[in-house]
Amino acid sequence: MEHAIELQNVHKSFGGFGIKDLSLQIKKGFVTGFIGANGAGKSTIIKMILNLLQPDAGEVRVFGMNYKESEKMIKERIGFVFNDDMLYGELTLLEMKKLIAACYRKWDDTLFHHYCDRFELPLRQNMKSFSDGMKMKAALAFALSHHADLLIMDEPTSSLDPIFRRELMELLRGVMLDEEKTIFLSTHIMSDLSSLADYITLIQEGEIVFSKALNEIEEEYAIVRGGAELLDKDTEQYFLSIRRSDNGFEALTADYQTVEKLFGSEAIIERASLEEIMYYSRGGKVDAAFN
Amino acid sequence: MLHLIKKDIVIHKFSWIIYFALLVFFVALDKDVIFIIALISAIITMDAFYADDQANGHTLWNALPFTRSEVVSARYASLLVFTVISMGTVILVELIFKWDWEPSLWKEVIGSFILMVLSGALCFPIFYWLSSQRKVIFVLLILYILLVIAGTYAFYYLYLYLSESQIVPRTLSDGQLFGFAILTALCLYTLSWRLSIKIYRNREIV
């Protein structure tokens, strides 16, 4: 299957933070949620995908092309949304649109105005008076108005209210009706992903912990709670992370069925949410490639 | 790239009125033409760098379909555009105010162009090298303006010295001298442009 994004053996040292030998593939035609704690390396990887940061070693390919040879062609096909404010405060949205629209060959003015109406964005108001949520909506309108094949979003929902967050998820689901589109989205809000993402990539301290289909994660990962007497060398191997307390233990497993057979009714076994997986899986590393 | 130059002009918006008012103010004060052109061009350039910095422009324009070479080249071209706009406006305002144009003022106009090209050649690579540290950019831009102001006086006294020393007038006419100076300045500007591209290509945009 063709990949929209491929990172191969990427190394990057950056201000006391490091990514070592990271490989990752993002499938074309799907939504991939990119999750991880603050400082895990999500933004660094997104910036490498956009060629804002260059890897010390390894290769980044987008749509099978590299930036050295096809920078403009790649960027034409990407719509991006960053968490940072990237608009000129003194300009109105209409003036900013004129600047950005001219950069893309496939810019669709009708579509842009449709999104501005839908997001209730004032076209003739200086953007310095925009709230954080409005700025994010403006960035979304820009990203969605040039028929990009790949949408890269770095925490787009963090400054949005719950109502618009839900609307955005609806909108992105609409975008994905076109099978040629790909969305790569980093977020801290896991509920956004459970309704939208096809795949989840978890990053921890610059390393990919896993990159799997969401339904696979839901089937495989579980939280196990039980008495300390259940733990020994043989049983511990099924856990990615174990937290012990005076009363027993809580652990994360990526092998739900085996653990269920092993412990039966002796332990409480529940499907793990993405938050729980993120919380418990610190330090564990599994194959990063999609199966 | 033309689009990036247009962006450098558009982002000033109403500030153009302030620049124009400042220019008229200095003409009314009868300040030297070289000083007015150089100062106004330097302020516009400084403002372009500062506005980009405030709006995370490096991230924005490098994520849009432009190469880093284009981003840098556009700023080098923009400085020339700002200088030519300032030159044209000062000439116009001088003519309107005084109904007269002393022929010697051409030397000041060309001198201001040389000065802007030289100061850009010197400062732009430093901006691209250090401006990733956001706190530094404001100080750098102020130093740039001070350098341009100092440059106007340096230019004036250098020209005076060369004229009085009789070394240059004996071998070169004024036209040849300014032609040579423009050529040298543009060569340095080209070298500086290549250096800035090299610096900016390796820059981490965070």
Image (cartoon, rainbow, N blue to C red):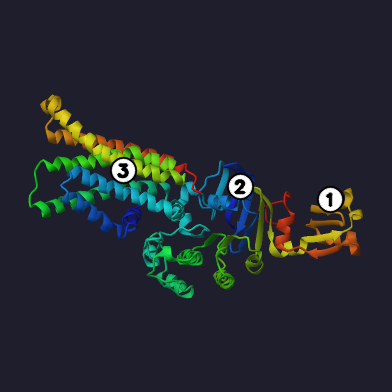
Which residue is found at the position 80% from the left and 60% from the top? A223
Q: Chain of mark 3?
A: B
Provide the secondary structure element on which disc 3 rests: helix
Q: Of discs 2 and 1, which sits in the foreground? A: 1
Tag 2 and tag 1 share a subunit: yes
Q: Nearer the viewer, residue A4 or B131?
A: B131
* Left or right of residue A264, residue A134 in this image: left
Identity, as a three-letter code, of the amino acid under mark 2: Gln
Q: Position of residue B155 (x, y in %)?
A: 21, 35
Tag 2 and tag 3 share a subunit: no
Q: Nearer the viewer, residue A251 or A246?
A: A246
Identity, as a three-letter code, of the amino acid under mark 3: Ile
**CA separation in Å, label 2 and label 3:** 46 Å
Tag 3 and tag 1 share a subunit: no
Q: Which residue is mark 3?
A: B145
Q: Dot 2, crowdedness within 10 Å: few (<14), some or many (≥20)?
A: some
Label ID, residue A8 = 2
Q: Which residue is mark 1?
A: A237
Q: Chain of mark 2?
A: A
Q: Chain of mark 1?
A: A
**CA separation in Å, label 2 and label 1:** 29 Å
* Left or right of residue B148, residue A30 in this image: right
Identity, as a three-letter code, of the amino acid under mark 1: Gln
Provide the secondary structure element on which disc 1 rests: loop
| Earlier-in-chain disc, 2 versus 1 | 2
B202, above or below A196, in the image:
above
Q: Position of residue A1 (x, y in %)?
A: 62, 59
Q: Of discs 3 and 1, which sits in the foreground? A: 3
Q: Position of residue B86 (x, y in %)?
A: 22, 50
Picture quarter with the C terminus of chain A: bottom right
